[in-house]
Amino acid sequence: MGTSKKPFLILDANILIDLYNFDWALVKLISAHVGQIHLATPVLSEVDEIDEGDCTKFGIVLVEPELDHVISASQDKGPLSFQDRLCLILAKEYGWTCVSNDKPLRQKCRNEEVPVIWGIELICILVEAGGLPVEQAKDIIKGIQESNPKYITNSIVNKAFRRLGLDDL
């Protein structure tokens, strides 16, 4: 019997905030059914709502960037924040999937052939892995969009709904 390898995930701050604002318990479900969640410590410092204890409690692996990661992230002055550059650098070096709603970070990941998924896509993958019922996912997706309409557009929601076999908004 074969087993499928779960990807390691690295989250940027906007995904972490979306999960926290909607239902922090999703983090445990994602870790159990989709893949181990990693978080760079400088990204954690961007998010006032949670701390290291929360990360430990919910199974998030905190990653302290190496000095060369920090130097590299500090040198590039493009459209990405220092924290977003760290997410990209760590994902690329360790073969992790970057989870972000930030369009410049997503584009940079694609340019550098780093796997990248939307936060809402992560909810779809959780359903497909058997960790969440479709109807609950629908409510979660709509709730995340309500709390973050700037990044979670109707187009993104409708794409997720179609993937889950649901009607568009």
Image (cartoon, helix red, strand yellow):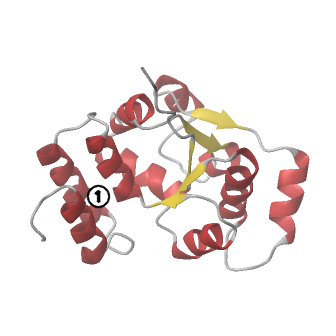
24 sits to left or right of 159: right
The crowding category of the residue bearing disc 1, from other C-alpha atoms within 10 Å (few below 14, some 14 to 19, many at least 20), is many
Percent x, y of residue 2: 45, 25
34 shown above or below 104: above
Percent x, y of residue 137: 21, 48
For this orientation, the residue located farthest to the bottom is 78
9 shown above or below 3: below
> Residue at the location (26% across, 34% down)?
130
> Residue at the location (44% across, 52% down)?
17
What residue did someone put label 1 on?
144
Percent x, y of residue 51: 55, 36
For this orientation, the residue located farthest to the front is 1
What type is the residue that disc 1 sits on?
A: Ile
117 sits to left or right of 18: right
113, 78: nearer the viewer: 113
81, 160: nearer the viewer: 160
> Residue at the location (47% across, 49% down)?
16
20 sits to left or right of 8: left
> Residue at the location (60% across, 54% down)?
46
Q: In the rendered view of the protein, which quadrant contains the C terminus?
A: bottom left
Which quadrant would residue 27 be assigned to in this image? Answer: top left
Q: Secondary structure at mark 1?
A: helix
